[in-house]
Image (cartoon, rainbow, N blue to C red):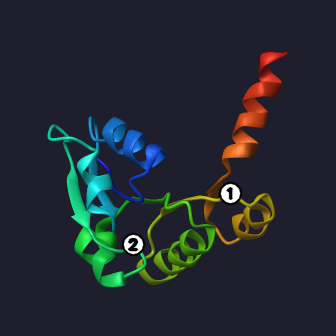
């Protein structure tokens, strides 16, 4: 089982956490308690109410033991800063960031971070629909 931390319990983070919690150890971090409540009572993971920008919160979430960290906050700059720190300071193998700005996607992919851009993914899927 992999140890996975997800920061940001919006639509994407919530669905990813619920899906991964069936087979992996998942910790969800969000600074909005209501968002964590949307995971439901039968969520098979750990919930941490805290700011993903705070290294103490990430350490409480187990960042030192994490196999992967997803940063899905909707704030590109926060995702980039935390992603770079976690990669360098804690040596997390897989750091995956949701980035909305396509220009930032190209720049930070070179830093060893996995960058996911929603628009790019949708365009790729749509192109396959006509193949």
> What residue is at 81 percent from the left and 64 percent from the top?
103
Q: Position of residue 116 (x, y in %)?
A: 64, 52
Q: Which residue is mark 1?
A: 100
- Callout count: 2
53 is higher (above) or lower (below) than 92 = below
Left or right of 18: which side holds 11?
Answer: right
Q: Are marks 1 and 2 in contact (CB under 8 Å)?
A: no
Q: Reading the chain from its start, which is encountered first: label 1 or label 2?
A: 2
Query: Is disc 1 surrounded by few (<14), some (14 to 19) or many (20+) residues within 10 Å?
Result: some
Query: Looking at the picture, how far across and down is residue 36, in whole percent?
Result: 27, 54
Q: Classify mark 1: helix, strand or loop.
A: loop
Instruction: Report the front residue among 33 and 123.
Output: 33
Q: Looking at the image, is 60 positioned above or below residue 109?
A: below
Residue 101 appears in which quarter of the rendering? bottom right
Reply above or below: 28 against 85: above
> Where residue 88 sits in the image (x, y, percent)?
51, 81
| Badge number at residue 52 | 2
Up the image or down, 33 lies above or below 24; here it is: below
Residue drawn where x is 41% and y is 42% of the image: 16
Instruction: Describe the element under mark 2 as helix, strand or loop.
Output: loop
Q: Residues within 10 Å of mark 2 (few under 14, many from 20)?
A: many
Residue at x-position 23% and y-position 74%: 60
């Amino acid at each position: 089982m992999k140890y996975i931390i997800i920061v940001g319990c919006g639509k994407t983070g919530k669905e990813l956490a619920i899906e991964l919690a069936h087979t992996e150890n998942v910790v969800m971090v969000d600074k909005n308690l209501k968002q964590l409540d949307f995971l439901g009572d039968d969520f098979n993971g750990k919930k941490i109410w805290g700011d993903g920008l705070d290294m103490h919160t990430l350490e409480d979430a187990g960042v030192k033991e994490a196999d992967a960290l997803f940063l899905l906050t909707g704030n590109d700059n926060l995702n980039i800063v935390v992603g770079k720190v976690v990669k360098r300071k804690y040596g997390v193998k897989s750091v995956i960031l949701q980035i909305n700005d396509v220009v930032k996607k190209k720049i930070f992919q070179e830093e060893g971070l996995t960058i996911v851009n929603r628009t790019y993914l949708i365009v790729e899927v749509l192109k396959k629909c006509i193949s």
